[in-house]
Image (spheres, helix red, strand yellow):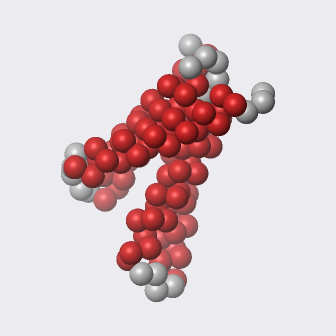
Amino acid sequence: KEERIRAAIGLGAAVFISVLFVLVFAGVIKLFSVESGVIRPVNQVFKIIAIVIGVLIGIRGEKRILKGALFGVVYSVVVNIIFSIISKTAFFSLSLVFDILFCGVIGLIGGVIAATAKR
């Protein structure tokens, strides 16, 4: 139970970081003329940072690598639901499948970092 609470806190932190990054970046886009080709890579970097921080906050105990991968998948689904609601767009698309895989791999990497970090 304690592990789930900690994971939920990590997930909340990761989602908060993502929303904060997106809002700040939207302001930057509005203030400066940012090319549209830059937006997707920057958003991917934001996801990487948010997931790794979330995993480091929320994942403890055994099987951190597996838990990290699962964390990334759950993060992807939650964030995509939130942004689908905000933007009033369809939740499911082919890009969601790739995003889930991408976030799962990033979560796995975060799990490796968490497993090897001294605590």
How many numbered discs? 0
Residue 39, given in percent of the width and then of the height, sits at: 43, 70
In-image side of 14 versus 115 (left or right): left
Residue depicted at 47% across the width and 77% down the height: 29
Above or below, 43 against 29 in this view is above
Based on the displayed image, in which of its 4 quarters is residue 24 positioned? bottom right
Q: Is residue 50 found left or right of 61 in the rendered image?
A: left
Q: Estimate the x, y position of residue 56 in percent, counting from the top left.
A: 65, 36
Instruction: Determine whether 57 is above or below 20 in the image.
Output: above
Q: Is residue 105 visible?
A: yes
Query: Is 45 on the left or on the right of 96, as rendered?
Result: right
Q: Residue at image x 42%, y 81%?
A: 35
Residue 91 left/right relative to 26: left
In this view, which residue lies farthest toward the bottom?
Answer: 33
In which quadrant will I find the N terminus? top right
Rendered location of residue 15, percent (x, y): 51, 45
Instruction: Give the residue drawn at x 22%, y 45%.
Output: 92
Answer yes or no: is residue 75 visible: no
Residue at x 26%, y 56% (from the top left corner): 88
Picture quadrant of residue 89? bottom left
